[in-house]
Image: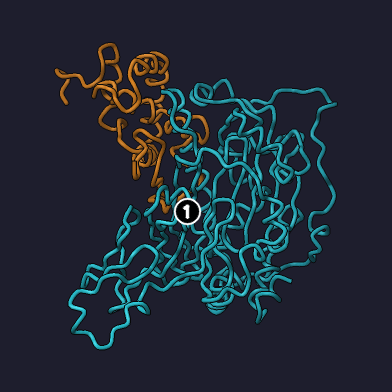
Chain colours: A cyan, B orange
Amino acid sequence: MSSVIERPAATRHIIDERSFTHAAGLGTGPVSVEPYRSPEFFELERERVFKRAWLCIGRVEQLPQVNSYFTKDIEIWKASVLVTRDKHDRIRAFHNVCSHRGNLVVNQTCGVAERLVCRYHNWQYRNDGELIGVPDQKHFFDLDRRSCGLTPIACEVWEGFIFLNHQKKPEVTLAEFLGPFGTRYAGIPYFNLDETIVIQADFKANWKLIADAFAEPYHVPSLHPATLAPGFAHPEENRYARPLSAMAHGIHRHFSAYGNPDYVPSPTSKVEALVYVQDTGGVLGGDASDNAAALTAHPAINPTKDRSWSADVTWLFPNFNIDYSTGGFWTHEFWPVAHDRTHWTLKIYIPKTMSIRHRLQLEHYACRWAEVVLEDVTNCERIQRGLDARAKDTMILQDAEMLIRHSLHVLDKWVKADRVADALA
Amino acid sequence: MTAASPSLPPGFEELEAFVPYWSLETNDQRRAARSTADMDDIQRFYDAIVARAEQAIVHCEQFALGFMPPASERLFKLLLAMNHAAIAVEMHGAPRAFDSTWPSAVRITEGPWPHGGGSR
Protein backbone atom coordinates (compact mmCIF):
# COMPACT_ATOMS: atom_id res chain seq x y z
CA MET A 1 0.00 0.00 0.00
CA SER A 2 1.48 3.30 -0.93
CA SER A 3 0.77 6.87 -0.20
CA VAL A 4 0.88 9.24 -3.12
CA ILE A 5 2.29 12.70 -2.71
CA GLU A 6 0.67 15.52 -4.66
CA ARG A 7 2.89 17.32 -7.15
CA PRO A 8 2.40 20.58 -9.04
CA ALA A 9 0.69 20.13 -12.40
CA ALA A 10 3.77 21.26 -14.33
CA THR A 11 5.68 18.07 -13.51
CA ARG A 12 2.87 15.67 -14.26
CA HIS A 13 3.72 12.62 -16.30
CA ILE A 14 2.59 12.89 -19.93
CA ILE A 15 1.57 9.62 -21.52
CA ASP A 16 2.98 9.02 -25.01
CA GLU A 17 -0.11 8.19 -27.08
CA ARG A 18 1.76 7.37 -30.29
CA SER A 19 1.26 3.76 -31.29
CA PHE A 20 4.20 1.49 -30.51
CA THR A 21 2.57 -1.22 -32.63
CA HIS A 22 2.28 0.94 -35.76
CA ALA A 23 5.82 2.26 -35.29
CA ALA A 24 7.11 -1.32 -35.23
CA GLY A 25 5.31 -2.05 -38.51
CA LEU A 26 3.11 -4.71 -36.97
CA GLY A 27 -0.53 -5.52 -37.67
CA THR A 28 -3.32 -4.83 -35.22
CA GLY A 29 -5.69 -7.78 -35.65
CA PRO A 30 -6.29 -10.72 -33.32
CA VAL A 31 -3.45 -13.28 -33.17
CA SER A 32 -3.63 -17.07 -33.08
CA VAL A 33 -3.10 -18.82 -29.74
CA GLU A 34 -2.18 -22.11 -31.43
CA PRO A 35 1.56 -21.51 -30.74
CA TYR A 36 0.74 -21.73 -27.01
CA ARG A 37 -1.07 -25.07 -27.04
CA SER A 38 0.00 -27.11 -30.05
CA PRO A 39 2.47 -29.99 -29.47
CA GLU A 40 3.22 -29.89 -33.22
CA PHE A 41 4.12 -26.21 -33.08
CA PHE A 42 6.30 -26.95 -30.07
CA GLU A 43 8.33 -29.45 -32.12
CA LEU A 44 8.74 -26.81 -34.83
CA GLU A 45 9.99 -24.39 -32.19
CA ARG A 46 12.48 -26.97 -30.99
CA GLU A 47 13.93 -27.69 -34.45
CA ARG A 48 13.63 -24.33 -36.20
CA VAL A 49 13.95 -21.83 -33.37
CA PHE A 50 15.85 -23.28 -30.41
CA LYS A 51 18.20 -25.39 -32.54
CA ARG A 52 19.05 -22.48 -34.87
CA ALA A 53 19.01 -19.39 -32.64
CA TRP A 54 21.83 -18.25 -30.35
CA LEU A 55 20.68 -18.95 -26.78
CA CYS A 56 22.04 -17.21 -23.70
CA ILE A 57 22.99 -19.76 -21.05
CA GLY A 58 24.91 -17.70 -18.50
CA ARG A 59 27.56 -15.08 -17.81
CA VAL A 60 31.35 -15.12 -17.81
CA GLU A 61 31.44 -14.60 -14.01
CA GLN A 62 30.23 -18.21 -13.70
CA LEU A 63 33.75 -19.10 -14.91
CA PRO A 64 35.74 -16.92 -12.46
CA GLN A 65 39.23 -18.36 -13.14
CA VAL A 66 41.23 -20.46 -15.57
CA ASN A 67 39.94 -24.08 -15.47
CA SER A 68 36.53 -23.09 -14.08
CA TYR A 69 33.65 -24.99 -15.61
CA PHE A 70 29.90 -25.30 -15.26
CA THR A 71 27.30 -27.65 -16.69
CA LYS A 72 23.75 -26.92 -17.69
CA ASP A 73 20.83 -29.03 -18.89
CA ILE A 74 19.19 -27.58 -21.97
CA GLU A 75 16.02 -29.61 -22.07
CA ILE A 76 14.77 -28.23 -25.38
CA TRP A 77 17.95 -29.73 -26.94
CA LYS A 78 17.64 -32.83 -24.74
CA ALA A 79 21.28 -32.10 -23.93
CA SER A 80 23.68 -31.52 -21.07
CA VAL A 81 26.28 -28.90 -21.97
CA LEU A 82 29.69 -28.30 -20.43
CA VAL A 83 31.12 -24.77 -20.51
CA THR A 84 34.80 -24.28 -19.64
CA ARG A 85 37.46 -21.61 -19.37
CA ASP A 86 40.64 -23.23 -20.70
CA LYS A 87 44.26 -22.40 -19.82
CA HIS A 88 44.36 -19.79 -22.60
CA ASP A 89 41.38 -18.06 -20.92
CA ARG A 90 39.15 -19.06 -23.80
CA ILE A 91 35.52 -19.88 -23.04
CA ARG A 92 34.40 -23.05 -24.79
CA ALA A 93 31.32 -25.23 -24.79
CA PHE A 94 30.87 -28.95 -25.44
CA HIS A 95 28.29 -31.64 -25.30
CA ASN A 96 28.89 -33.20 -21.88
CA VAL A 97 29.08 -36.66 -23.44
CA CYS A 98 31.92 -39.21 -23.39
CA SER A 99 33.19 -40.49 -26.74
CA HIS A 100 33.53 -44.03 -25.37
CA ARG A 101 30.01 -45.18 -24.50
CA GLY A 102 28.04 -41.95 -24.46
CA ASN A 103 27.83 -41.37 -20.73
CA LEU A 104 27.67 -37.87 -19.23
CA VAL A 105 31.23 -36.86 -18.32
CA VAL A 106 30.76 -34.21 -15.62
CA ASN A 107 28.07 -34.60 -12.98
CA GLN A 108 28.86 -31.50 -10.91
CA THR A 109 27.05 -28.24 -11.64
CA CYS A 110 30.30 -26.24 -11.42
CA GLY A 111 33.90 -26.49 -10.30
CA VAL A 112 37.55 -25.96 -11.18
CA ALA A 113 39.45 -28.66 -13.09
CA GLU A 114 41.79 -28.84 -16.06
CA ARG A 115 41.05 -32.53 -16.55
CA LEU A 116 37.53 -33.89 -16.65
CA VAL A 117 37.03 -37.59 -16.10
CA CYS A 118 34.14 -39.80 -17.16
CA ARG A 119 33.66 -42.04 -14.12
CA TYR A 120 32.34 -44.96 -16.17
CA HIS A 121 35.79 -46.09 -17.40
CA ASN A 122 37.93 -43.09 -16.42
CA TRP A 123 38.36 -41.60 -19.90
CA GLN A 124 40.01 -38.23 -19.37
CA TYR A 125 39.44 -34.98 -21.27
CA ARG A 126 41.25 -31.66 -21.03
CA ASN A 127 38.97 -28.64 -20.64
CA ASP A 128 39.71 -27.67 -24.26
CA GLY A 129 37.88 -30.86 -25.26
CA GLU A 130 40.86 -33.04 -26.18
CA LEU A 131 40.81 -36.69 -25.12
CA ILE A 132 44.03 -37.11 -23.11
CA GLY A 133 43.66 -40.41 -21.28
CA VAL A 134 42.23 -43.83 -22.14
CA PRO A 135 42.85 -46.61 -19.59
CA ASP A 136 44.03 -49.88 -21.18
CA GLN A 137 44.20 -48.18 -24.55
CA LYS A 138 46.15 -51.04 -26.20
CA HIS A 139 43.09 -53.29 -26.19
CA PHE A 140 41.05 -50.88 -28.32
CA PHE A 141 41.09 -51.30 -32.09
CA ASP A 142 42.77 -48.51 -34.10
CA LEU A 143 41.62 -45.89 -31.60
CA ASP A 144 42.40 -42.38 -32.90
CA ARG A 145 42.40 -40.29 -29.74
CA ARG A 146 42.59 -37.01 -31.67
CA SER A 147 39.20 -37.62 -33.26
CA CYS A 148 37.57 -38.65 -29.98
CA GLY A 149 37.47 -35.35 -28.14
CA LEU A 150 34.35 -33.84 -26.63
CA THR A 151 31.89 -32.63 -29.28
CA PRO A 152 32.17 -28.83 -29.39
CA ILE A 153 29.18 -26.49 -29.36
CA ALA A 154 29.42 -23.07 -31.02
CA CYS A 155 29.98 -20.53 -28.22
CA GLU A 156 30.30 -16.74 -28.36
CA VAL A 157 30.26 -13.99 -25.75
CA TRP A 158 28.51 -10.60 -25.96
CA GLU A 159 28.93 -8.08 -23.11
CA GLY A 160 29.77 -10.91 -20.71
CA PHE A 161 26.76 -13.04 -21.68
CA ILE A 162 27.59 -16.52 -23.00
CA PHE A 163 25.55 -17.70 -26.00
CA LEU A 164 25.45 -21.18 -27.56
CA ASN A 165 24.20 -22.33 -30.94
CA HIS A 166 23.11 -25.91 -31.59
CA GLN A 167 24.02 -25.84 -35.28
CA LYS A 168 27.38 -27.55 -35.96
CA LYS A 169 28.30 -24.60 -38.15
CA PRO A 170 25.95 -21.76 -37.20
CA GLU A 171 24.41 -20.11 -40.25
CA VAL A 172 24.89 -16.69 -38.67
CA THR A 173 27.32 -15.27 -36.14
CA LEU A 174 26.16 -14.03 -32.75
CA ALA A 175 26.72 -10.43 -33.93
CA GLU A 176 24.50 -11.06 -36.97
CA PHE A 177 21.89 -12.70 -34.76
CA LEU A 178 21.86 -9.79 -32.29
CA GLY A 179 21.76 -7.30 -35.17
CA PRO A 180 20.79 -3.73 -34.21
CA PHE A 181 20.14 -4.80 -30.62
CA GLY A 182 23.77 -5.86 -30.18
CA THR A 183 25.13 -2.47 -31.21
CA ARG A 184 22.47 -0.36 -29.51
CA TYR A 185 22.89 -2.10 -26.15
CA ALA A 186 26.69 -2.41 -26.25
CA GLY A 187 28.69 -0.63 -23.55
CA ILE A 188 26.13 -0.74 -20.76
CA PRO A 189 27.85 -1.04 -17.38
CA TYR A 190 27.05 -4.28 -15.56
CA PHE A 191 27.60 -4.12 -11.82
CA ASN A 192 26.92 -6.13 -8.67
CA LEU A 193 28.01 -9.20 -10.60
CA ASP A 194 29.19 -11.38 -7.73
CA GLU A 195 26.00 -11.82 -5.72
CA THR A 196 22.64 -13.06 -6.92
CA ILE A 197 19.17 -13.85 -5.72
CA VAL A 198 17.94 -16.82 -7.78
CA ILE A 199 14.25 -17.67 -8.04
CA GLN A 200 13.18 -20.70 -10.06
CA ALA A 201 9.90 -22.28 -11.01
CA ASP A 202 8.86 -25.42 -12.88
CA PHE A 203 5.27 -25.06 -13.89
CA LYS A 204 2.48 -26.19 -16.19
CA ALA A 205 2.30 -23.58 -18.92
CA ASN A 206 3.83 -22.78 -22.29
CA TRP A 207 7.16 -20.92 -22.06
CA LYS A 208 5.81 -17.94 -23.99
CA LEU A 209 3.10 -17.26 -21.40
CA ILE A 210 5.67 -16.34 -18.76
CA ALA A 211 7.80 -14.45 -21.30
CA ASP A 212 4.65 -12.52 -22.25
CA ALA A 213 3.98 -11.72 -18.59
CA PHE A 214 7.23 -9.77 -18.44
CA ALA A 215 6.67 -8.16 -21.83
CA GLU A 216 3.76 -5.92 -20.87
CA PRO A 217 2.98 -3.77 -17.82
CA TYR A 218 -0.76 -3.52 -18.63
CA HIS A 219 -1.44 -6.38 -16.15
CA VAL A 220 0.52 -4.81 -13.26
CA PRO A 221 -2.34 -2.85 -11.64
CA SER A 222 -4.71 -5.85 -11.81
CA LEU A 223 -2.50 -8.90 -11.17
CA HIS A 224 0.06 -7.27 -8.86
CA PRO A 225 -2.09 -4.71 -6.99
CA ALA A 226 -0.06 -4.80 -3.76
CA THR A 227 3.36 -6.08 -4.80
CA LEU A 228 4.08 -3.86 -7.83
CA ALA A 229 1.25 -1.50 -8.73
CA PRO A 230 2.06 1.19 -6.14
CA GLY A 231 5.53 1.64 -7.64
CA PHE A 232 4.78 0.96 -11.30
CA ALA A 233 1.45 2.68 -11.86
CA HIS A 234 -0.26 5.82 -10.61
CA PRO A 235 -3.96 6.21 -9.81
CA GLU A 236 -4.17 9.52 -11.73
CA GLU A 237 -1.14 9.87 -13.99
CA ASN A 238 -0.71 6.36 -15.37
CA ARG A 239 -3.50 4.14 -14.22
CA TYR A 240 -2.73 1.28 -16.60
CA ALA A 241 1.07 1.49 -16.34
CA ARG A 242 1.44 2.41 -20.01
CA PRO A 243 5.08 1.97 -21.12
CA LEU A 244 7.22 5.05 -21.67
CA SER A 245 8.50 3.45 -24.88
CA ALA A 246 8.27 0.09 -26.65
CA MET A 247 10.31 -0.77 -29.73
CA ALA A 248 11.46 -3.64 -31.93
CA HIS A 249 15.22 -3.93 -32.53
CA GLY A 250 15.48 -6.42 -35.40
CA ILE A 251 14.22 -9.71 -33.95
CA HIS A 252 14.66 -8.41 -30.38
CA ARG A 253 12.67 -5.79 -28.47
CA HIS A 254 12.36 -3.60 -25.39
CA PHE A 255 9.91 -1.60 -23.36
CA SER A 256 10.59 1.05 -20.74
CA ALA A 257 8.47 0.79 -17.64
CA TYR A 258 6.86 3.71 -15.89
CA GLY A 259 7.80 4.21 -12.24
CA ASN A 260 5.88 6.35 -9.80
CA PRO A 261 8.58 8.90 -8.89
CA ASP A 262 6.79 9.88 -5.70
CA TYR A 263 6.39 6.39 -4.36
CA VAL A 264 7.12 6.05 -0.67
CA PRO A 265 5.92 3.30 1.64
CA SER A 266 2.66 4.08 3.40
CA PRO A 267 3.05 5.07 7.09
CA THR A 268 1.20 1.88 8.02
CA SER A 269 3.79 -0.23 6.16
CA LYS A 270 6.23 -0.12 9.04
CA VAL A 271 8.60 -2.82 7.87
CA GLU A 272 8.77 -1.59 4.29
CA ALA A 273 9.46 1.92 5.62
CA LEU A 274 12.17 0.56 7.90
CA VAL A 275 14.08 -1.18 5.12
CA TYR A 276 13.18 0.97 2.12
CA VAL A 277 15.80 2.81 0.09
CA GLN A 278 14.50 5.81 -1.83
CA ASP A 279 15.39 5.82 -5.50
CA THR A 280 13.73 6.87 -8.73
CA GLY A 281 10.54 4.97 -8.17
CA GLY A 282 11.66 1.39 -8.61
CA VAL A 283 10.29 -0.57 -5.68
CA LEU A 284 12.58 -3.37 -6.78
CA GLY A 285 15.69 -2.01 -5.12
CA GLY A 286 17.88 0.99 -5.55
CA ASP A 287 21.57 1.74 -5.95
CA ALA A 288 22.59 5.36 -5.71
CA SER A 289 26.10 4.64 -6.93
CA ASP A 290 27.96 6.01 -9.95
CA ASN A 291 27.13 2.72 -11.65
CA ALA A 292 23.45 3.59 -11.66
CA ALA A 293 24.24 7.05 -13.05
CA ALA A 294 26.28 5.53 -15.91
CA LEU A 295 23.49 3.08 -16.63
CA THR A 296 20.78 5.72 -16.85
CA ALA A 297 23.00 7.92 -19.03
CA HIS A 298 23.40 5.19 -21.68
CA PRO A 299 21.36 6.13 -24.79
CA ALA A 300 19.67 2.71 -25.04
CA ILE A 301 18.36 2.83 -21.47
CA ASN A 302 15.12 4.74 -20.95
CA PRO A 303 15.55 6.13 -24.49
CA THR A 304 13.04 8.94 -23.96
CA LYS A 305 14.96 9.84 -20.75
CA ASP A 306 11.65 10.14 -18.95
CA ARG A 307 11.81 11.22 -15.33
CA SER A 308 9.13 8.69 -14.42
CA TRP A 309 11.30 5.73 -15.40
CA SER A 310 11.67 2.58 -13.35
CA ALA A 311 13.14 -0.18 -15.51
CA ASP A 312 13.83 -1.37 -19.05
CA VAL A 313 12.79 -4.84 -20.10
CA THR A 314 14.77 -6.18 -23.05
CA TRP A 315 13.65 -9.43 -24.63
CA LEU A 316 16.30 -11.15 -26.68
CA PHE A 317 14.72 -13.59 -29.09
CA PRO A 318 13.72 -16.24 -28.32
CA ASN A 319 13.76 -16.80 -24.54
CA PHE A 320 16.04 -14.38 -22.67
CA ASN A 321 15.45 -11.08 -20.88
CA ILE A 322 18.00 -8.60 -19.57
CA ASP A 323 16.23 -6.01 -17.45
CA TYR A 324 17.83 -2.82 -16.19
CA SER A 325 16.89 -0.52 -13.33
CA THR A 326 18.62 1.95 -11.07
CA GLY A 327 19.16 -0.92 -8.64
CA GLY A 328 21.10 -2.95 -11.19
CA PHE A 329 19.98 -5.68 -13.53
CA TRP A 330 18.31 -9.04 -13.59
CA THR A 331 17.84 -11.75 -16.21
CA HIS A 332 15.10 -14.21 -17.07
CA GLU A 333 15.67 -17.54 -18.80
CA PHE A 334 12.41 -19.02 -20.04
CA TRP A 335 13.22 -22.63 -20.94
CA PRO A 336 10.62 -24.71 -22.78
CA VAL A 337 10.22 -28.25 -21.45
CA ALA A 338 7.05 -29.32 -23.27
CA HIS A 339 4.28 -27.39 -25.02
CA ASP A 340 2.70 -26.93 -21.60
CA ARG A 341 5.74 -27.15 -19.30
CA THR A 342 8.36 -24.49 -18.53
CA HIS A 343 11.46 -24.12 -16.42
CA TRP A 344 12.08 -20.48 -15.50
CA THR A 345 15.15 -19.02 -13.81
CA LEU A 346 15.24 -15.42 -12.59
CA LYS A 347 18.68 -14.15 -11.52
CA ILE A 348 18.79 -10.81 -9.74
CA TYR A 349 22.26 -9.30 -9.40
CA ILE A 350 22.58 -7.60 -6.03
CA PRO A 351 25.25 -5.66 -4.15
CA LYS A 352 27.30 -7.52 -1.55
CA THR A 353 25.67 -7.33 1.87
CA MET A 354 27.16 -4.31 3.61
CA SER A 355 25.34 -4.12 6.95
CA ILE A 356 22.53 -5.53 9.06
CA ARG A 357 20.10 -2.95 7.69
CA HIS A 358 21.21 -3.60 4.13
CA ARG A 359 20.70 -7.34 4.65
CA LEU A 360 17.14 -6.67 5.84
CA GLN A 361 16.50 -4.57 2.74
CA LEU A 362 17.78 -7.40 0.52
CA GLU A 363 15.48 -9.86 2.30
CA HIS A 364 12.50 -7.60 1.64
CA TYR A 365 13.59 -7.26 -1.98
CA ALA A 366 13.85 -11.06 -2.37
CA CYS A 367 10.48 -11.70 -0.75
CA ARG A 368 8.72 -9.07 -2.83
CA TRP A 369 10.20 -10.62 -5.98
CA ALA A 370 9.18 -14.14 -4.96
CA GLU A 371 5.64 -12.92 -4.37
CA VAL A 372 5.51 -11.26 -7.81
CA VAL A 373 6.78 -14.49 -9.33
CA LEU A 374 4.14 -16.48 -7.44
CA GLU A 375 1.43 -14.22 -8.83
CA ASP A 376 2.73 -14.64 -12.39
CA VAL A 377 3.30 -18.41 -12.27
CA THR A 378 -0.12 -19.08 -10.78
CA ASN A 379 -1.62 -16.86 -13.46
CA CYS A 380 0.24 -18.59 -16.33
CA GLU A 381 -1.06 -22.00 -15.28
CA ARG A 382 -4.58 -20.58 -15.35
CA ILE A 383 -4.07 -19.11 -18.85
CA GLN A 384 -2.80 -22.48 -20.12
CA ARG A 385 -5.98 -24.17 -18.88
CA GLY A 386 -8.05 -21.47 -20.53
CA LEU A 387 -6.26 -21.82 -23.87
CA ASP A 388 -6.33 -25.64 -23.76
CA ALA A 389 -10.11 -25.51 -23.45
CA ARG A 390 -10.10 -24.32 -27.10
CA ALA A 391 -12.97 -21.92 -26.39
CA LYS A 392 -10.86 -19.23 -28.10
CA ASP A 393 -8.69 -19.45 -31.19
CA THR A 394 -7.23 -15.96 -30.97
CA MET A 395 -6.23 -13.37 -28.43
CA ILE A 396 -6.68 -9.61 -28.66
CA LEU A 397 -3.65 -7.43 -28.00
CA GLN A 398 -3.58 -3.73 -27.19
CA ASP A 399 -0.77 -1.29 -27.96
CA ALA A 400 1.04 -1.81 -24.64
CA GLU A 401 1.23 -5.51 -25.52
CA MET A 402 3.26 -4.79 -28.66
CA LEU A 403 6.20 -6.94 -27.57
CA ILE A 404 4.00 -10.05 -27.51
CA ARG A 405 2.78 -9.33 -31.04
CA HIS A 406 6.37 -8.83 -32.18
CA SER A 407 7.47 -12.06 -30.47
CA LEU A 408 4.81 -14.08 -32.29
CA HIS A 409 5.60 -12.34 -35.58
CA VAL A 410 9.31 -13.20 -35.32
CA LEU A 411 8.58 -16.72 -34.12
CA ASP A 412 6.36 -17.31 -37.15
CA LYS A 413 9.15 -16.17 -39.46
CA TRP A 414 11.67 -18.52 -37.86
CA VAL A 415 9.30 -21.48 -37.99
CA LYS A 416 8.59 -20.89 -41.69
CA ALA A 417 12.04 -19.85 -42.97
CA ASP A 418 14.31 -22.55 -44.39
CA ARG A 419 17.38 -20.35 -43.95
CA VAL A 420 18.26 -18.37 -40.83
CA ALA A 421 19.20 -15.42 -43.04
CA ASP A 422 15.59 -15.32 -44.26
CA ALA A 423 14.30 -15.47 -40.69
CA LEU A 424 16.48 -12.47 -39.83
CA ALA A 425 15.44 -10.46 -42.88
CA MET B 1 14.50 -25.17 24.00
CA THR B 2 12.76 -24.71 27.35
CA ALA B 3 11.72 -21.56 29.14
CA ALA B 4 14.56 -22.19 31.58
CA SER B 5 17.19 -21.77 28.84
CA PRO B 6 16.27 -18.81 26.69
CA SER B 7 17.60 -18.92 23.14
CA LEU B 8 17.61 -15.14 22.52
CA PRO B 9 19.87 -12.46 24.00
CA PRO B 10 18.75 -10.98 27.34
CA GLY B 11 16.11 -8.33 26.95
CA PHE B 12 14.27 -10.02 24.07
CA GLU B 13 12.38 -12.60 26.18
CA GLU B 14 8.98 -11.64 24.77
CA LEU B 15 10.09 -12.85 21.32
CA GLU B 16 11.10 -16.27 22.66
CA ALA B 17 7.80 -17.92 21.69
CA PHE B 18 8.36 -17.06 17.99
CA VAL B 19 11.80 -18.66 17.67
CA PRO B 20 10.78 -22.25 16.85
CA TYR B 21 8.49 -21.28 13.97
CA TRP B 22 10.13 -18.14 12.54
CA SER B 23 13.89 -18.31 13.19
CA LEU B 24 14.89 -20.24 10.07
CA GLU B 25 18.06 -20.65 8.03
CA THR B 26 17.03 -19.79 4.46
CA ASN B 27 15.02 -17.21 2.63
CA ASP B 28 12.82 -19.92 1.09
CA GLN B 29 12.10 -21.53 4.49
CA ARG B 30 10.97 -18.17 5.89
CA ARG B 31 8.76 -17.63 2.83
CA ALA B 32 7.18 -21.08 3.26
CA ALA B 33 6.60 -20.44 7.00
CA ARG B 34 4.70 -17.25 6.21
CA SER B 35 2.82 -18.72 3.25
CA THR B 36 1.44 -21.63 5.29
CA ALA B 37 0.73 -19.80 8.58
CA ASP B 38 -2.63 -18.52 9.80
CA MET B 39 -3.06 -14.78 9.36
CA ASP B 40 -3.64 -14.34 13.11
CA ASP B 41 -0.29 -15.98 13.89
CA ILE B 42 1.48 -13.85 11.26
CA GLN B 43 -0.07 -10.70 12.73
CA ARG B 44 0.97 -11.66 16.28
CA PHE B 45 4.57 -12.23 15.15
CA TYR B 46 4.56 -9.04 13.09
CA ASP B 47 3.29 -6.92 15.99
CA ALA B 48 5.82 -8.39 18.41
CA ILE B 49 8.89 -8.12 16.16
CA VAL B 50 8.06 -4.68 14.75
CA ALA B 51 7.76 -3.33 18.31
CA ARG B 52 11.34 -4.48 19.05
CA ALA B 53 12.87 -4.18 15.56
CA GLU B 54 14.98 -1.08 16.17
CA GLN B 55 16.50 -2.46 19.40
CA ALA B 56 17.08 -5.85 17.77
CA ILE B 57 18.87 -4.21 14.83
CA VAL B 58 21.07 -2.19 17.19
CA HIS B 59 21.87 -5.37 19.12
CA CYS B 60 22.84 -7.28 15.96
CA GLU B 61 24.95 -4.38 14.70
CA GLN B 62 27.47 -5.16 17.45
CA PHE B 63 28.60 -8.16 15.42
CA ALA B 64 30.05 -8.76 11.98
CA LEU B 65 27.65 -10.32 9.48
CA GLY B 66 28.02 -14.08 9.46
CA PHE B 67 29.88 -14.07 12.82
CA MET B 68 27.15 -13.62 15.41
CA PRO B 69 26.88 -15.61 18.63
CA PRO B 70 24.03 -18.17 18.33
CA ALA B 71 21.53 -16.21 20.44
CA SER B 72 22.06 -13.03 18.41
CA GLU B 73 21.90 -14.98 15.17
CA ARG B 74 18.48 -16.35 16.18
CA LEU B 75 17.32 -12.81 16.82
CA PHE B 76 18.69 -11.70 13.45
CA LYS B 77 16.79 -14.50 11.72
CA LEU B 78 13.61 -13.24 13.39
CA LEU B 79 14.35 -9.83 11.87
CA LEU B 80 14.75 -11.47 8.48
CA ALA B 81 11.42 -13.27 8.93
CA MET B 82 9.81 -9.92 9.80
CA ASN B 83 10.11 -8.98 6.11
CA HIS B 84 8.11 -12.03 5.12
CA ALA B 85 5.42 -11.31 7.71
CA ALA B 86 5.29 -7.79 6.26
CA ILE B 87 4.39 -9.16 2.80
CA ALA B 88 1.29 -10.71 4.37
CA VAL B 89 0.39 -7.84 6.71
CA GLU B 90 1.37 -4.77 4.66
CA MET B 91 0.67 -5.98 1.11
CA HIS B 92 -1.96 -8.71 0.94
CA GLY B 93 -3.82 -8.68 4.24
CA ALA B 94 -3.57 -12.45 3.78
CA PRO B 95 -0.75 -15.00 4.13
CA ARG B 96 0.05 -14.90 0.41
CA ALA B 97 -1.05 -13.45 -2.92
CA PHE B 98 -4.73 -13.53 -3.79
CA ASP B 99 -5.70 -16.69 -5.74
CA SER B 100 -2.18 -18.13 -5.56
CA THR B 101 -1.63 -21.85 -5.20
CA TRP B 102 0.29 -23.66 -2.46
CA PRO B 103 2.40 -25.79 -2.49
CA SER B 104 3.98 -23.49 -5.01
CA ALA B 105 6.11 -24.18 -8.08
CA VAL B 106 8.23 -21.17 -7.08
CA ARG B 107 11.48 -21.62 -5.12
CA ILE B 108 14.06 -19.10 -3.91
CA THR B 109 17.10 -21.26 -4.65
CA GLU B 110 19.65 -18.62 -3.72
CA GLY B 111 19.05 -15.78 -1.29
CA PRO B 112 21.23 -12.89 -0.11
CA TRP B 113 24.15 -13.74 2.17
CA PRO B 114 24.08 -14.60 5.06
CA HIS B 115 21.17 -16.96 5.87
CA GLY B 116 19.77 -16.71 2.35
CA GLY B 117 20.30 -20.32 1.33
CA GLY B 118 21.83 -21.66 -1.85
CA SER B 119 25.41 -22.30 -2.81
CA ARG B 120 27.04 -19.89 -0.34
**The C terminus of chain A - image quarter:** bottom right
Q: Residue at x 85, y 26 (%)?
A: A10
What type is the residue that disc 1 sits on?
A: Thr
Residue A410: x and y in percent read 68, 68
**The N terminus of chain A - image quarter:** top right
The residue at the far bottom in this view is A141
Which quarter of the figure has residue A380?
A: bottom right
Which quarter of the figure has residue A318?
A: bottom right
Q: Residue at x 75, y 33 (%)?
A: A307
Location of residue A291 with respect to A270 vertically, above or below: below
Residue B30: x and y in percent read 36, 37
Location of residue A92 with respect to A102 vertically, above or below: above
Residue B99: x and y in percent read 50, 48
- Towards the viewer: A412 or A324: A324
**In screen coordinates, is A164 left or right of A398?**
left
Residue position for label 1: A345
Residue A408: x and y in percent read 67, 67
Location of residue A363 with respect to A323 vertically, above or below: above
Residue B37 visible in this rendered orientation of the protein: no
- Chain identity of mark 1: A
Location of residue B91 with respect to A132 vertically, above or below: above
**In screen coordinates, is A409 left or right of A55?**
right
